[in-house]
Image (cartoon, rainbow, N blue to C red):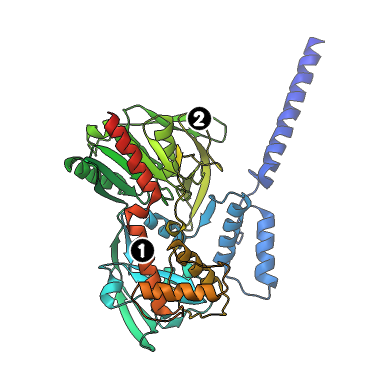
Amino acid sequence: MRRSRFLLFIILAALATVVFLLLDGCSGEGKGNMVKKEGEISTYPVIDEAFDIIKGKGVYPVDKDMLIEGALRGMADTIGDPYSTYLSQDEAAAHKESLAGERIGIGAEITRSGGKYIIVAPVKGSPSEKAGLQPYDEIVRIDGERLDGNSLEDVVQRIRGKKGTAVSMTIYRPDMDKHIELSIVRDSISVQTVSAKVIEERGKKIGYISITMFGQETPQEWLDATNKLIKDGAESLIIDVRGNPGGYLHTVGSLIGSLAKIDTVFAYMEDAAGKHQPLATEKDSKLAYDEELKKMPIVLLQDKGSASASEVLSAALKDLKRGYIVGDTSFGKGTVQETMDLSNGGEMKLSTHKWLTPKKEWIHGKGVKANLEVVQSELFSEHIRLVPEVYSEGDYHDDVAYTQKLLTGLGYSVARTDGFFDESTSHAVSAFLKDAEAKEGNTMDRLFYTTLKKKVEEFRADPLNDDQLQMAIGYIHHKMTDK
């Protein structure tokens, strides 16, 4: 009886093993059984079926590689995560370049307005400035080909290229009413992510340091900037990450390590299984930060544009009571992405972890709240652009609404900001031009918009107009006085 039961157990176990193998073979639509055959693009039959139908019966010809890229992009999009995405080979290279210490290009800011591609400004000392490119120049052709149907991203990609190569551009210059041919040699454009200065306030020296993103060279730039601030007598620090979209996690970790004690946990990484891994500050063997930094009072300035790595910094300073946060609630991006190489030269950028604050809070969708909320003038958040069109009283356009907001921010009385060029707007334009000593009149033309851009930039450059900065200065001066 026992022997028969044992044999029955062996038979059942064998059957279970067969069932398990069958189930395992079926999971993932044939994983283990399917072998990629010659002519197939994958081991998943349904993908090959769709590929063959589109290639064989579609009325519109589609390149094979474009179909595959579309499938890769579609898989990433299906996740529903705006931070998980497929990057083509060119996009992957551009992504890496955006966080590098330098970029290859011509050094010019370009905008799209009214279907036209307009030069906003050439970077000082850049190839575009040396070649004679000017604000308001309209790009008509690149390397002899028109830009019809191109997006702004397409235009930028066509201008980019290898260092030392030339790009030819046909531009239309409105002031001269003529087309000009330019040949611009691409070169390295230095990307500085950290800038610093000393602010003297009622006998106290405050170090002000701005970080535009957390790139590859940011730790070295931070070291150089903070060393100079300390040498110049700074006794405290204001860190400005307003508008900083983030960057490398290891970079922000290095910066926090210069401000806090070694082995201080500044964040936690949470994987898909919910397991937490603490991230602690370490001694950087390459960068010898001044120990004086660890003793300085700190205020961090942030706004709605401060995201990702910027929030890791602000949350760490706040939770560890190492700094005081002034400004707006930050953006609220609490995920970490890894980029993995693909065989076609592209990359899959995937959210693989959540990051948590030292108090193990997830700020995703919520942001890091400032200790002190300060409302800022809209002139600091409005994107300043050049407008190539001409508007006068009675016109209605988004460009007019944009102008009305700027005039209001500069203190001119405008009855409406909906884009209708009414009588009050006409009076405001006339008063602005008169005050700027530009010309007489009430028309929004190229001279008007050039002058408006200049005046808004001057407004922003005056620290007395920066309410958030002034509040940070006031707070940190109070902390220094109380010491």
Residue 19 picture quarter: top right
Q: Which residue lies furthest to the top in this view?
A: 2
Nearest to the observer: residue 259 or residue 99: 259
* Residue 369 percent across, percent down from the top left: 49, 39
The answer to whether residue 350 shows anywhere in this view is yes
- The kind of residue on which mark 2 rests is Lys
Rendered residue at 61%/57% (across/down)? 74
Q: Which of 169 and 305 is in front in this view?
A: 305
Q: Residue at x 27, y 67 (%)?
A: 124
Q: Can residue 118 be seen in this view?
A: no
Q: Which mark is residue 457?
A: 1
Q: Which of marks 2 and 1 is nearer the N terminus?
A: 2
Q: Name the residue under label 2.
A: 360
Left or right: residue 40 versus residue 321 is: right
Residue 417 located left or right of residue 459: right
Residue 362, image x, y percentages: 53, 35
